[in-house]
Image: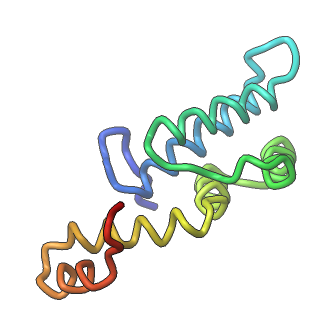
């Protein structure tokens, strides 16, 4: 398995790091109480500070933290679950940005045709 390294800047490495942070805060229990709430807040803050966003509603996070505590998930599974919590509008916007950065001419043409004019 080729796990991401800290210095790797790919999107998969970002989600892997966020998943590892969440898992460790839940399992290591650094506080006397309410470690799950702390892990939830720190993970959302990390994701937002990195320029992305996730759904912060209670239910998906409760299920994710319950699965982490039960040791049902690996770090890569946690990263996949976090990635799946992105709102749909963020995913479509990211595709446009990635297409605009594409080094291939067809990617640039596609990005120009899909881009939405600014205000």
* Left-right relation of 101 to 40: left
Q: Quadrant of residue 29?
A: top right
**Residue 74 point in image, percent of width and height:** 66, 52
Determine the image quadrant of residue 83: bottom right
- Position of residue 113 measured from the top left corner of the image (x, y, whole percent): 27, 85
Residue 10 drawn at (x, y percent)? 34, 55
Across and down, in percent, residue 101 comes to 21, 66
The foreground one among 9 and 70 is 9
Vertical relation: 101 (above or below) 59: below
User: Is residue 29 depicted above or below 57 in this figure?
Assistant: above
Image coloring type: rainbow
Among all residues in the image, which is located at the extreme top?
Answer: 32
Q: Residue at x 39, y 72 (%)?
A: 95
- Between 75 and 85, the one lying in front of the other is 85
Residue 93 in the figure: left or right of residue 82 = left
Q: How many marks?
A: 0
Q: Residue at x 60, y 69 (%)?
A: 88
Which residue: 62% across, 62% down?
Answer: 87
Relative to 119, 39 lies left or right = right
Q: Residue at x 52, y 62 (%)?
A: 90
Q: Which image quadrant: the C terminus?
A: bottom left
Placement of 27 over or under 70, stated as above or below: above
Q: Nearer the viewer, residue 102 or 115?
A: 115
């Amino acid at each position: 398995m080729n796990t991401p390294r800290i210095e790797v800047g790919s999107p998969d490495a970002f989600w892997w790091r966020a998943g590892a942070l969440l898992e460790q805060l839940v399992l290591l229990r650094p506080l006397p109480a309410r470690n799950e709430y702390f892990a939830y807040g720190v993970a959302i803050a990390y994701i937002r500070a990195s320029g992305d966003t996730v759904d912060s509603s209670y239910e998906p996070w409760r299920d994710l933290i319950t699965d982490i505590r039960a040791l049902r998930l690996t770090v890569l599974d946690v990263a996949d679950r976090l990635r799946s919590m992105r709102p749909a509008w963020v995913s479509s916007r990211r595709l446009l940005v990635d297409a605009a950065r594409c080094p291939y001419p067809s990617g640039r043409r596609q990005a120009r045709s899909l881009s939405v004019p600014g205000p």
